Image (cartoon, helix red, strand yellow):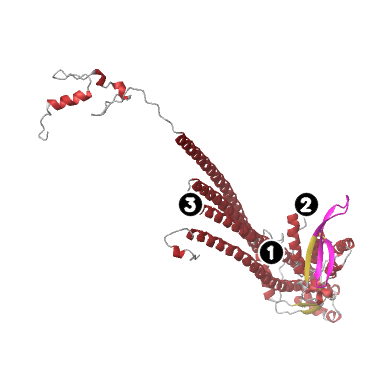
Amino acid sequence: PDDGSQEPQSQIDSYQEHTDPSFQHPHGYQEPASQVAQPSEFNNPDNIPNPVGEIPASNAPPKAEIVNPEQEAQRQHEEAKRQEEAKIQDEQEAHMKALQLEQYRKDEKHIQEKLQLEGQLQEAFHNETMFAPSKNFADMKPKYTMDYGIKMGDFEGVKLFKTRLNHEKDLKIVISDPEVVDEGFFVGKHLSFKVEVQPLSWAVHRRDKDFNILRDYLVKAFPHLVIPAAPEFNAYKSMDKSMIKKREHLLNRFMNKLMIQKDLRACPAVLDFVSYEDSKAFTKQLKQSLESAPKLKFVSEFPTSTGIHKVHITKQVEMLCNQFEKYVNSHECLFKKFHFLGRKLSSDLMEVAKTLDALSFCSNNISTMYKIGNSDDMGDLYGNLSDHFKKWSKDMHNEAKINLKHIPQYFNYTSSEYEGYKDLFNNRNKFIERFLTKSNDLQVKKEKLFKSGKPDKWHLRDEDMKRSMDLLNDKTEALRVMLPDQTQEVMNYEIAYTYVSNQCYSEIKKFNSHEIKDLYSHFKEYTAKMNEVFEQEQKNLSYFIGTLHSKPGDHPEEDHKVDI
């Protein structure tokens, strides 16, 4: 009651009557024993009494349930379906975990390779002598100061006679038809290529190693020219099909770059290389030429197509040569990094393709499950999505192949072409070393002769001998005129060094101009191929979006308005 008074005794008795089986009714009434619920009948381990009004469960045995065969078959079918779906889901989860683990390992490997390369590049940029010659000729003592006001002029040298290679402007060398030749047990196998000269219709066969011997000879015979790089000869890999194909491509580049230089076109060894038919005799002759090739010392020994050598001492030439030699190693490092990143790009695209294949697989399984559940629209949707992922994966594969061919492989060869620059500058450094050594020795010898005070041992010319007494009082003039023959020899070394520096300047300009054209042509082809892949990707995406709009929807009038 709201007034806080006690409840009526009749209500309390009624509650106890329904909840306590031992309750004695005040009027002596008792329910039959069969109707009194015992605690065990509640099937309750905690002996919690039934709520008021709840009817206890009967102790009578349950009636036998009648089983319908159709319902049982349906139940078994659904159970088998659930088990199959669970199995597919487990397989998909296991497959995705395996893909994630594989991707994680590859990412770790890429990170390690990247860190290793970054460390090498960092070391190279801070240590510019990493790829430089062991000697730094610019720091040799005594240093020689060039007189940039002097122009030495033109000097005569060896003139190369023009050949038929010089008369053809549009000359092309074609390397083809690789063949493995077996010359018996003692000689073994070697790789041979066909060398054609168009449009002269010359055709000869050359051993794989002959190309490298030819380059070694040209480096020795033409120390003032940049000799293009030839692919490194490796007898152990020369029989591999992929290596043969790659070597054939690089040899084509090597031979055609030789034809750019008119002095090399006029070289007898180059002419014999592309025209002499007896392969064995030519190989023997080429080896002998390499062994007997003289070391050039003076300008008069340098072969050119004109026989005239322009020698001018200019500050611009010296500055360019010194700067280019200083940074050539950094350029080489950057090209190596370009090559590494190009390979990584192709590898990453292949990983994307694998992920798209996995998405295609998952979409196909989802499509199958929807079709089992009689949801054909959803099944078709995921089926189209699976096809789209599969086509997308194929496009990624094509992109990876195109990038691998046009970026890392191209710049790997471009990096190797710096060997030609390094050969040229190494030759220049040798001429510098020779000139400085001879100049220093001559200066020391002249100082000793002047201190002796005996002009008759100075080997003076007749006109200078007449003023010998005056020369004893003029040290500068005496040092200039004494030992004239040896002084002229040192001057010839200076002329040779200056000429090679002039050649470095002109060769850098010439080859940079050619590289621009070559690079333009290369990337024009690269972008054209990539554009084909992008157009195919656009078609695939348009088709997929078209399948979405082809289903009944809210805006059927927009089905054909697909804009990407």
> Reading the chain from its start, which is encountered first: label 1 or label 3?
3
Residue 193 forms part of the magenta stretch: yes
Q: Which residue is mark 2?
A: 236
The residues bearing labels 2 and 1 have C-alpha atoms spaced at a distance of 24 Å
Instruction: Please say if 144 is above or below 361.
Output: below
Residue type beneath disc 3: Met
Look at the magenta stretch and give its main secondary structure. Answer: strand
Tell me the residue that label 1 is attached to: 414
Q: Position of residue 324 (x, y in %)?
A: 67, 68
412 vs 177, left or right, is: left
Instruction: Inspect the image, locate mark 2, and give the three-letter code of the amino acid beneath it.
Output: Tyr
Q: Disc 1 or disc 3, which is closer to the eye?
A: 3
Residue 38 on image: x %, y %: 28, 20
Q: Nearer the viewer, residue 327 or 411?
A: 411
Say which quadrant the N terminus sits in: top left
Depth check, mark 2 against mark 1: the one in front is 2
Reading the image, the residue beneath label 3 is 378
| Magenta stretch contains residue 314 | no
Answer whether labels 1 and 3 touch (C-beta < 8 Å): no
Residue 319 location (% of width, % of height): 67, 72
Magenta residue span: 178-206
